[in-house]
Image (cartoon, rainbow, N blue to C red):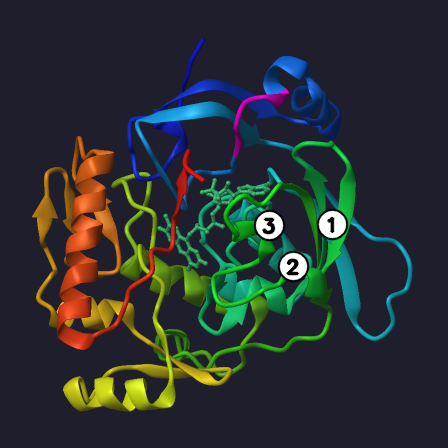
Amino acid sequence: MSFDLSHYNTLGLSAVANAGHIITDEKSLRKILLRSDYSSQATWILGGGSNVILGPKIDGQVLLIKTRGVSFVPGNKGNDLVLLTISAGENWHQLVRYTVAQGLYGLENLALIPGSVGAAPVQNIGAYGVEISDLLHSVRAMHIQSGEIERFDNERCGFAYRDSVFKRVGSPWIILDVTLGLSTTPHFEVSYPDVAEELKKRGTTQVSGAKLLQSVISVRRRKMPDVRDIGNAGSFFKNPLLDNSKMQDTLTQIPDMPVYPHGQKFKVSAARLIDVCGMKGTKVGGFEVWQRQPLVLVNRGEGTFEQLMELSEKIQNAVMDRFGIALEREPGLLGSR
Ligand SMILES: Cc1cc2nc3c(=O)[nH]c(=O)nc-3n(C[C@H](O)[C@H](O)[C@H](O)COP(=O)(O)OP(=O)(O)OC[C@H]3O[C@@H](n4cnc5c(N)ncnc54)[C@H](O)[C@@H]3O)c2cc1C
């Protein structure tokens, strides 16, 4: 028995697992997890497949999370807070659209990020100055071995830049649903230059949820390739977080490098580092560093796992040699612990 995953990952990699199951409810998920013949083999979780690198042969079973449902948590939360619980298999961008249409504020900057709601906390998705951790109330998750369900409040999720406890190697948790705390009072994050410029270009004097949403969508359509047209996993590397002295050192080499304070550190642009290394358009087999945004590696056709890894290493080596900065891959490898 085998399960073809080639159409379940946005990089367009060919991959086959020993078995695959489409999960539409918690009961059947638990049943599969506890079934004796399966409990002995490795179990991998897949949402929309937009942030994973699949090896050609995945040893074990893959669970594709397709649960559906959105509900308001009843009761008065005080102030202007509304709690919304969303099943893991819902589409993230559709959720963002839904909340804006409902007059709920908070998610606008996270529009058009591909993938599922259940995967959003895994790498603490973020864009244009907002991360899901800013809005996340709690997560319900099932333990992969016992089938027990536990609730994780925001703190227990261990959020950091593109990271959480769920992204750590060997995490045994399958996220079932996500509860977000959204606001009925408008407050917008419009400080990122791309978004601010787009709002200005549209002549926006009074920002609204719908206007911000449309601006973010326009910026993203310009900047990122559409996974329906060309295989990719969005940003292939995290933006490096540097301490003050390394950031200053990098600025002497690239004086116009965009720098964003991030806690005690400074986030610098991985795209800029790759660009300065002259890597735009570099190809290995079917994979290529995208000309318009060098943080994105695109599959021009029959790109393979090995070619992608080779290109990724080439970029990491170039940036290390020139700047002494280690680029960390953003998408995880599915199929190896
Ligand atoms: C064009 C493009 C643009 C992107 N832009 C952004 C961006 O701006 N910001 C950003 O942060 N990311 C971005 N991404 C990355 C990606 O969209 C997000 O990380 C998204 O949350 C992944 O969702 P998914 O359902 O596709 O996850 P998958 O790729 O299916 O899975 C990602 C990881 O989460 C795990 N996982 C998935 N579902 C669950 C679950 N229910 N429980 C436990 N673990 C689970 C998987 O095992 C895997 O380790 C972009 C990707 C693309 C292709």
**Per the image, is 181 magenta?**
no
Badge 1 amino acid: Thr
Residue 332 x/y as whole percent: 41, 47
Q: Which residue is mark 2?
A: 157
Task: Specify few, some or many for label 3: CA neighbours under 10 Å numbering under 14, 14-19, or 20 or more.
Answer: some
Q: Which residue is mark 1?
A: 85
SS of the residue under disc 1: strand
Pick out the residue farthest to the front: 40
Q: Which residues are magenta?
A: 39-44
Instruction: Residue 148: give its label.
Output: none
Task: Specify few, some or many for label 1: CA neighbours under 10 Å numbering under 14, 14-19, or 20 or more.
Answer: some
Q: Which residue is mark 3?
A: 95
Front tag of 3 and 1: 1
Residue drawn where x is 53% and y is 70% of the image:
130
Badge 2 amino acid: Cys
Q: Earlier in the sequence, mark 3 or mark 2?
A: 3
**Residue 27 seen in render:** yes
User: Horizontally, is 301 left or right of 99 in the view?
Assistant: left
